[in-house]
Image: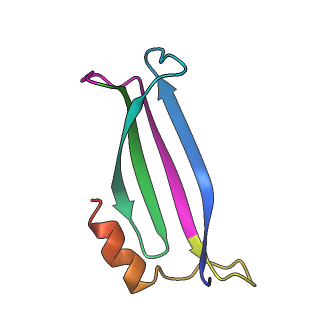
Amino acid sequence: GDPIALVVETGCRYFSALDYPGEVEVGIRVAQLGRSSVTYQLGVFAVNVDEAAAEGHFTHITVDRESRRPVALPEEWRVKLKALS
């Protein structure tokens, strides 16, 4: 589609080990919603554990597919992203 979203920043902090194979639960929220960007925060948890084993973030920038120049988030995306705030 057009526009597209590019990941421009990521980060993760680890607090405790998780076992493989094992189940995990991941929580996600929109931490910041800008004109052309959105930053998500994630928490990774072992099942039935209240303390996060890891927390991370990543930022998407919406850009025009051809020019790769930033463009405003489409309103349809913005509505869906606000539900994660």
- Counting from the top left corner in percent of width and height, residue 76 is at 39, 83
Colour pattern: rainbow
The span shown in magenta is: 48-61
Residue sticking out furthest to the front: 21
75 in the magenta segment: no
| Vertical relation: 84 (above or below) 76 | above
- Counting from the top left corner in percent of width and height, residue 66 is at 75, 84
| Vertical relation: 54 (above or below) 7 | above
Q: In which quarter of the image is the C terminus?
A: bottom left
58 in the magenta segment: yes
Residue for point 30% across, 60% down: 84
Q: Which of 41 and 34 is in front in this view?
A: 41
Q: Is residue 20 left or right of residue 34?
A: right
Residue for point 48% across, 67% down: 37
Q: Nearer the viewer, residue 63 or 45?
A: 45
- Occupied quadrant, residue 27: top left
Q: Is residue 8 left or right of residue 79?
A: right
Q: Which of 69 and 2 is in front in this view?
A: 2
| Vertical relation: 32 (above or below) 66 | above
